[in-house]
Amino acid sequence: MRKTEGRAAPQPLKKEKHFAGLPVGAGIAIGPAHLITDQSPSLQPRAIRDNEIEAELTRLDEAIAKSRRQLNKLRTQLAMLPAEGQAELEPLLNAYIQMIGPSRLLRGARKRVEGLASAETAVAAETEALAVTMMAATDRDRAGLKRRADEIREIGRRLIRNLTETPFQSFAKLAQGTVLVIDHLRPADAALLSPARLAGVVTEEGGTDGHTAVMLRALGIPAVLGAPGITDFVRTGDLMVLDGHAGSVVVHPSVTTMATARRASTAFARERQKLAQLRRLPAETTDGQSVELLANLEVPIELPLIAQAGVEGIGLFRSEFLFMNRSEVPDEDEQTEAYRAAIEAMGGDPVTIRVLDWGGEKEIEALQTTSTVNELTRLNPALGLRGIRMLLRHPELLETQLAAIIRAAVSGPVKVLLPMVTTIDEVRATREIYQRVAKRLRRRGETMPERLPPIGIMIETPAAALSADALALEADFFAIGTNDLTMYAMAADRGDADVAKLYDPLHPGLLRLVQFTIEASLRLRKPVSVCGEMAANPKLTPLLLGLGLRCLSMNASAVPRVKMVVRAVSIADCARLARRVMEQTEPAAIRDLVEDFAAKLA
């Protein structure tokens, strides 16, 4: 065999490696990896002597001041971000700045320094203690609790970096078309990324509901978070294919994989353009039936996304965010301003504000000083005092919130929504309080709308659904909360792995509760909507329309695809589907009918 001189031996092709993570930013990214490893300082607990306390407190104050300057500088850079990114980061930065003011975190850190811990040790210990306390709460919104715990830890990390003079991460030198690979991307760091330069992002840690995820979606960067093992395997320069819709990452892709990825990228671009065109088109079926598509609002940072989704209003404004992460209950003026801001942002479209859904598994620090703290710790909180039950037990909270909603209603059309209603007496008692509050506002000389906002109720329990015909005599409208209704109907918590499979919105029993509610509202000419996750699933849209619904409220990102389905179906076909579904006795058969109908629309 003749030896070839002067030629380098061909390099063997590397075998492609697949990683699975959480889909966050839809889109396909193809490009070389740029790996950044964590540079967080490694701390060992360190004690100090009595004569060092003053010096350590001074170091802590200097780190606080430096952190505040950094955050204020970052806030001035918001103008460079898209509107959605600005709306996501500004409240977060405000929360960070508040935490490095006269906060529980800093009070605790100073006490630890006075107890002879170094400034770094004190900050690290107090940060972790507060985060652990937050995560120990029994709130069913685990993602929300984790997000708030991460915010506390982020401020702790910033203070420790400044105390130890550890440099912050820089993304200025990322090459054009790079796929950033990093163990954990923090929201403030995400704000520094350039969508024009960056192809995509993949992280070792992270979830779909955090601030970082929302920021990446706002920036329009394809992203996969929480891909275990990715930072250990990847090296800078490795070719990658990232699918932000499927949550998949391929390192060293084959020729076939690359070809598939390029086709998927082209298809995604076409679909995105098509969905964008839907924004200004009406949500109208092929046989001319109008469908009202509304958005759910969890926190104010979602308002820009809602405004761009082409919705006709906010169908569920969750007011709990006003009471979270604070030591005092918001007063009437503060609540009024928060509601007014959302109403004005909607430019004349209706806003449905749900009063505080507090109690049961939800814990709010600002309310823990009240006498109800013992009531919230019962063995079965989901079946205890929560929602309107708790508010009627403590009417001062309800009166303040209703007064704020009435005052804010001068800025635009508003509705009031009551959570967890099960009896007629609860609606009547609330109306009495409502009228009393309105009279008090008139005596005070407050500017009020010509008519008080209508009062509706959430249908979240089988009792409420089965007595919907009676409740419709007292309520002005219904909003079916399918998440809780499914949980109570099936006696199954989807957060409990042992029974999660029983949590099935296509169970015939649950569908009959929905059907009964809709029929009762239609008979008495009362508006009805669905505001649970069923509304956001485009495969279920034809079934809901066939059952008689003409109003769906969902997260803003789901609106375009639901609207696409609405515009592709006729009410006659949907009604036939609903009749066939309601004849079934097995969830599997129902699912097959729904899937077959959806497949014909594809």
Image: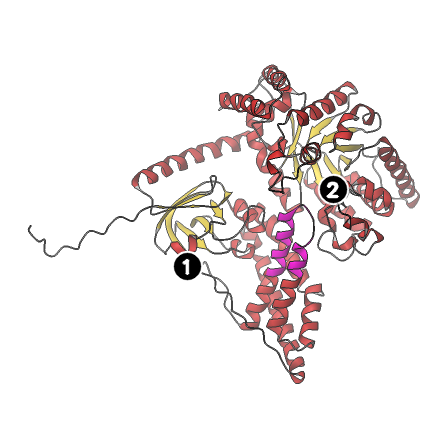
Instruction: Mark 1 and mark 2 in contact? Answer it, CB < 8 Å.
Output: no
Q: Which mark is residue 382?
A: 2
Q: Classify mark 1: helix, strand or loop.
A: loop
Q: Residue furthest right?
A: 443
Q: Which residue is mark 1?
A: 173
Name the residue located 36 percent from the left edge and 36 percent from the top edge.
Answer: 260
Is there any visible trace of residue 533 in the rendered image? yes
User: Overall secondary structure of the magenta stretch?
Assistant: helix
Residue 134 lies within the magenta run: yes
7 over 262 or under it: above or below: below
Indicate the amino acid at tag 2: Ala
* Total labels drawn: 2
565 over 68 or under it: above or below: above
Q: Which residues are magenta?
A: 130-153
Distance Cα–Cα, label 1 vs label 2: 51 Å
Indicate the amino acid at tag 1: Lys
Specify which label sits upstream in the sequence, 1 or 2: 1
Q: Residue furthest bottom?
A: 51
Name the residue located 56 percent from the left edge and 32 percent from the top edge.
Answer: 560
Name the residue located 72 percent from the left edge and 47 percent from the top edge.
Answer: 362
Q: Which mark is residue 193?
A: none
Say few, some or many: other residues with alpha carbon within 10 Å of mark 2 (under 14 / 14 to 19 / 20 or more). Answer: some
Report whether 187 appears left or right of 431.
Answer: left
In x, y percent, where is residue 265?
41, 37
Q: Classify mark 2: helix, strand or loop.
A: helix
48 over 199 or under it: above or below: below
Say few, some or many: other residues with alpha carbon within 10 Å of mark 1 (under 14 / 14 to 19 / 20 or more). Answer: few
In x, y percent, where is residue 39?
48, 65
Pick the residue in front: 40 or 353: 40
